[in-house]
Amino acid sequence: MAFLSPAMIGFTVFAVLPVLGGLALGLFDWDLFSTPRYVGARNFVRLFSDPTMWQSLFVTLQFLLLGVIPTVLLGFMLAVLVNSKLPAVPALRLLFFVPMIASSAVTALVWAMLYNERQGFVNQALGVIGVDGPNWLSDTFWALPALVIVMIWSALPLVIILYLAGLQRVPDDIYAAASLDGAGPWRQLWSMTWPSVWPTTALVLALQAIGFLSGSFEMALLLTDGGPLGTTQSLALYAYRVAFNDLNFGYASALSMFQLVVFAAIVGIVQGVRRTLRKGGL
């Protein structure tokens, strides 16, 4: 208990108490300057009749659906590549881990230049093959996929590290036996390597679900400010605007508590799938 206490104290002070404080603040109407006025559950009831909240929830789920699965699959494939004995692997490892050293602000600045409609590298590369690229961050269709690509790029280093740790625990004997049975590289990859790292996959899924739920706030705020027309405004960004633009901290706290429930539900689903697959022998 003595060794655990520093971590538990930190968790209580910086996680548990803010959640309880946010829950309590959601019961009040407060603009930060006047005296808080108790309104009961009115802020929480308002959630379900707020069309902007539903739009922001839909955008948040889009970030998840478009980002988590591609990040997991791409991270797994890159980890397999990095774990191989190819001559260029050391250079590839350096390139793959570069996003870890860049802050969100730097990442947003670099990708804003890459996405520039006239001078950005992305549209210039598309122009070489005769494709007229859109104004990525101002287009109602392409803005969200553009942000998802940035978030995938930022998330890949951690996913690769976790998969590398999982791959290095897979015994070489099973590959030798598979080779004797005539299994080729692709068959070994999907029938042996992928099932062997399933515990890592479950962890990565949970971490990336949380990462895309929270990371959508930073990238949307820095690159698009939630636009165009709210197509990149996540729940977190909407709560931020309600708090600091509208000075409605009670309703913003209710939005944050609802987002916490969404977080918990998604993580619970991932854990439920993990337990189901484990019972099935995976």
Image: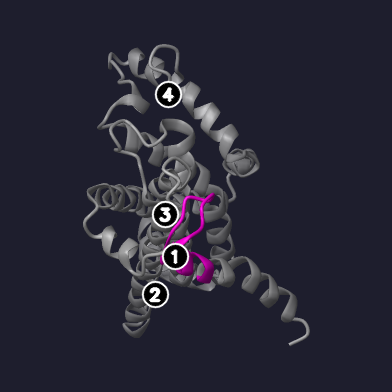
The residue tagged with tag 3: helix, strand or loop? Answer: helix
Quote the CA–CA distance across marks 1 and 4: 29 Å
Q: Which label sits in the foreground, 1 or 3? A: 3
Circle nearer the N terminus (4, 3): 4
Circle 3: residue type: Ala
Circle 4: residue type: Tyr
Q: Position of residue 229 (x, y in %)?
A: 28, 33
Quote the CA–CA distance across marks 3 and 2: 29 Å
Count numbered badges in the picture. Answer: 4
Q: Which label sits in the foreground, 3 or 2? A: 3
Q: Which residue is found at the position 63% from the left and 74% from the top?
A: 12
Rendered position, 263 above or below 7:
above
Label ID, residue 271: 2
Quote the CA–CA distance across marks 1 and 2: 8 Å
- Give yes or no for residue 36 being in the magenta stretch: yes
Mark 1 and mark 2 in contact? Answer it, CB < 8 Å.
Answer: yes
**Residue 110 located left or right of residue 273:** right
Q: Which residue is found at the position 41% from the left and 56% from the top?
A: 185
Label ID, residue 252: 3
Q: Which residue is found at the position 51% from the left and 71% from the top?
A: 20
Quote the CA–CA distance across marks 4 and 3: 32 Å
Q: Position of residue 72 (x, y in %)?
A: 42, 55
Magenta region, residue range: 20-37
